[in-house]
Image: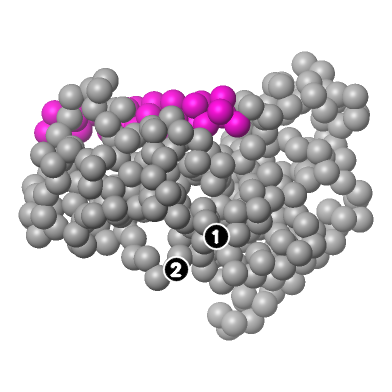
Amino acid sequence: MNFDMYRVFYDFNLDYSIENNKEYETNMLITQVMNDFIHKYNVYFADYTFILEYQDDVFGLITYMLFKNLRSIFDFNFKLTCKNKIKLTKSFLNKKDIIRYKKAIKTNSAIYFNCFNPLFYVINSQKIFNNLSKDKSLIAKFTPEELLIACDFYQIHDKKILNPWNTLNCKYLSDFCNRNFLNEASCCLDTYKIFYYNNIIPKIKVYNLTGTQDDFPIFDKILNEKNTIIFYNCPEDKINFIKSNLNPYIEKRNAVIEDFNVNLPKEFIEKLQSERANLINSFNKKEG
């Protein structure tokens, strides 16, 4: 493992697995996505139209199903639009929800969403997103496993619609999301770095914890960390206490996971710090 690997993992910020029950985690993610949407946009429900830049594939269909869930609870105007003719997923859609792209562009008081998911976007880099939606997506944090489980939830079983899983290296994607960096898999990270790296280089910080209630004030500091890859030191027999009291509240990319960010050798952290410093120096030289 090196700083590049941690940085790729951090940048994707997916809903990485921290439980053995994938169905439970997926259900919790869907609930969180819906709650976040309601909290952020409920003040616009009466006066705005929510328009989905639809993709005629499994990612578009899952996004559409999430909007259907939301509309079953709240009354707001929703439409979807697609530049190309919808064929593959047509039977799942309500025709009344579909409007032409030209009309979508001209709609007053509109909020646009897309079907973006970073892991699949970088693999299928020819697909164009974000023409109108400015990076708003309901499925941006879904891992491949969670997307597949969502397909089960929504009774999406058509093999043609599920085709992305037949054409992608899903074993590697699963290893990535479960933080299992196999030697043969880690080399593939170069592909992700090329397509997805942002211009921000996250900091590295190490927190020393006791695994007792004395850590709770420190947890508050951890939860407020921004742009930081976090590592933890604590007694081995207290790791589960920290996981139970911190993981449910922290971003999944910094969740406490053994052999990934807990009790790593001091020399290893120093190596990551050095690699980060070298990366910053190389960027400064280019800008200079």
Color encoding of the figure: one colour
Q: Is residue 71 visible?
A: yes
Image quadrant containing the C terminus: bottom right
Question: Which residue corresponds to mark 2?
Answer: 125
- The stretch drawn in magenta includes residue 23: yes
> Residue 140, position in %: x, y?
45, 47
Q: Inspect the image, locate mark 2, and give the three-letter code of the amino acid beneath it.
A: Ser
Question: Which residue corresponds to mark 1?
Answer: 168
On the picture, is 228 further left or further right than 155? right
Q: Inspect the image, locate mark 1, and give the three-letter code of the amino acid beneath it.
A: Leu
Residue beneath the point at 39% across and 33% down: 155
- The stretch drawn in magenta includes residue 260: no
Highlighted range, magenta: 22-50
Q: Is residue 115 visible?
A: no
Residue beneath the point at 56% across and 42% down: 145
Q: Does the residue at mark 1 contact the one at mark 2 (Cβ under 8 Å)?
A: no
